[in-house]
Amino acid sequence: MEWIEIEATTVDEAVAVALKELGLSSRTEATVEVIREGKSGFIGLGRQMAVVKVSKAPSQRSRRRRRGRGKGGSDGDSQSNGGRGGQSRSEKTSGDSSGSSGGGNRNKGGSRSRSENGNRRSEGGRTSEKRQRSSTQSDARTDDEGGERSSNKAVLAEQTEVAADFLRGLLEAFGLEGTVETRNEKDALYIDIEGDQTEALVGPKGTVLQAVHELTRTVVQRKTFGAPRIRLDIAGYAARRRKALQIYSSQLATKVIEDKEETMLEPMNAADRKVVHDAVGEIDGVRSFSEGQEPHRSVVIAPAE
Amino acid sequence: MSDGKIVESVVTYITKQIVDDAETVEVEVASDGPDAVVAEVRTAKSDMGRVIGRRGRVARAIRSVARAAGDEEGLSVQVEFLD
């Protein structure tokens, strides 16, 4: 999914900038996820920027609910500007970017857009706009409606290398012996860390593994301005766990069929939810879907209609 | 060996991978009682947001991995981020 993350003083401002960047003219065309509400603080002290993650909404599938709008935005104002920016699809032109930074500055104390070729951070480093995309091809983002995007092999190869380097360095910093193997499947990056000693990086209930995963994604994002879907396994932990989750899901599905009553599982991350969906999909007479908002999104297993 | 060397190398390594200004990164590991250390992480002001991450996710991940590093040395670890 093509998305960008924008930081600005208020949620509405961040959304406005994001819409412009994506070439969308209205918020209804976008899926907006509020990562963090901004706080105005006191003369800059304790101020927190609002962060939103915005992607082009799938035209057919149901739009995700949007929550938590910041107050006092200048939505309408920036939106007219967004429409203008939206016409120039090829966002690399400097004319467009200077236009957008002008737009940002109009908002009092608002977000400042960085110009495409300029510094990554604006002065003071407090206001920044990050652009994170999994692909630099502009045509890849125009047709992401079908779900499958055309992948950019070169970008994925670079991201794969960055991830593997980071993890090898991490093993070294720990003084652990282990191997890091990567493979690319479709747009996803699979990483297996193996070796007896690497068990140390799994941690209780896989918490350390999750942390390593998070850091890997962060590093890849910082260095390549985008991150693919990453599947990380350490010492076979994720594989064992996935197997257990599959079995558990199948058992639950059987029970749903017997009881004719839907069941909601505990909240899970997207990767785990997919395991459940796949396991349920194998069984006739039940269906599954997800409900709720991250990070509390849960799978529901229900009798087939 | 329980002097926090692994904690120090791990926290330093991760932090430097995440920030823009790796030169400015300083990690100091100090004893905090028997079998406990505090790792103080200093970065450029402008990199603080990177190290903390949205909703503190990156900071939490660093803490988690730092604790795993501490386990290797039999140390409990606290990580503090300063600029």
Image (cartoon, coloured by chain):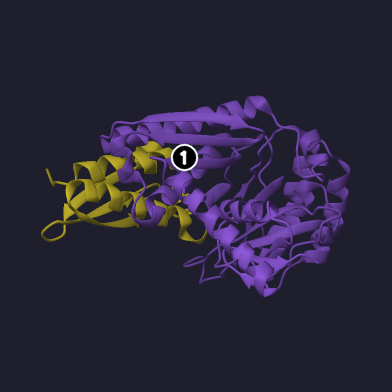
The residue singled out by tag 1 in the image is B20
Of residues A103 and A230, the one nearer the viewer is A230
Chain A, which colour?
A: purple
Indicate the position of residue A223 as horizontal and vertical percent values: 53, 35
Determine whether, in the image, residue A239 is placed left or right of residue A81. left
Of residues A210 and A49, the one nearer the viewer is A210
| Quarter location, residue A68 | bottom right
What type is the residue that disc 1 sits on?
Asp
Name which residue lies at 75% across and 47% down: A21
| Quarter location, residue A199 | top left
The C terminus of chain A appears in which quarter of the rendering? bottom right
The secondary element bearing badge 1 is classed as loop
Determine whether, in the image, residue A58 is placed left or right of residue A132. right
Indicate the position of residue A96 as horizontal and vertical percent values: 80, 40
Chain B, which colour?
A: yellow
Name which residue lies at 44% across and 51% down: A210
Vertical placement of residue A114 versus A172, above or below: below
Residue A298 shows up from this direction: no
Determine whether, in the image, residue A67 is placed left or right of residue B24. right
Determine whether, in the image, residue B76 is placed left or right of residue A96. left
Of residues A30 and A41, the one nearer the viewer is A30
